[in-house]
Image (cartoon, rainbow, N blue to C red):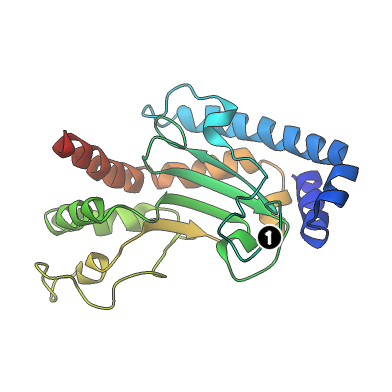
Amino acid sequence: MEQVLDFLRELSCNNERTWFNAHKDRYKEAHDRFCAFALELLESVRRFDSAIGPLTIKDITYRIYRDIRFSSDKSPYKTHMGVIICPGGKKSGYSGYYFQVSGAQGESWTGSHMVAVGSYMLEPKVAAVIREDIENSGGEFRRILSRADSRFEIDWTDALKRVPAGFPTDSPDSDYFRLKDFLISYIPDDSFVTAPDLVPRLTEMFRTAKPFLDFVNRAIGWSREEAR
């Protein structure tokens, strides 16, 4: 992963087409290495999660070119590479296991390495179903979170300021009712990304979070059934 990280760091300092075109060979080599890693991670995850079927590299990775049509930032390239492993692939709408390596350093999520499980920007109806499931779970949601790798943290960034109407404010789960994004994440440092055995280490982290992912995806699947 060091070669991938080195390229992304240089790209973050030279994010323009002339530099990128002059270093296309380096990009291709970094891209090929990351894709090989992504496929290895996919197969490793499939060994413990039977909901993940056969997927192609296009199903689990993203293009490096940014959509700048409606952005004030006209940098043409992403400075991170990510892999998302979820039932049906990245366009399925289901939550998944996510890992990214980033060459930039900043406060936004694109400016850091990341290990994450779950979803952000869920449809309101899906978030409402998850809240109902949490309320009716008899504490199971809290137990699921407690069994996930201790490095994972809930993303409270866009949480509601108050418990939404219809949910109790005095429940042990009240804070979870405020969530709009059902995502747990870990921001590792360079040593985590570049150390040996990255695939086994990520696989074990993801394995501990499978019950959380199942909880979220169950609500997504139920919402789709209701919409039919």
Q: Which residue: 54% across, 52% down?
A: 115
> Residue 211: horizontal and vertical position, in percent?
32, 44
The residue lying furthest to the front in this view is 69
Residue 216's spot in the image, x, y percent?
A: 29, 47
**Quarter of the image that includes the N terminus:** top right
Task: Return the x and y of residue 196 as percentages of the image width and height.
Answer: 71, 43
Which secondary structure, mark 1?
loop
Q: Residue at x 34, y 58 (%)?
A: 146
Residue 26 percent coordinates (x, y): 85, 40
Reply above or below: 18 against 199: below
For the residue marked with disc 1, what is the amino acid? Lys
- Mark 1 — residue? 74
**153 relative to 160, above or below:** above
- Residue at 44% x, 41% y: name it: 207
Image height of 178 relative to 116, above or below = below
Residue 157 falls in image quadrant: bottom left
Quarter of the image for the C terminus: give it. top left
The answer to which quarter of the image holds residue 141 is bottom left
Left/right placement of residue 197 relative to residue 48 reads right
In the displayed structure, 22 sits above or below 107; it is: above
- Report crowding for label 1: few under 14, some 14 to 19, many 20 or more residues within 10 A (C-alpha): few
Q: Residue furthest top?
A: 54
Is residue 14 shown left or right of residue 207? right
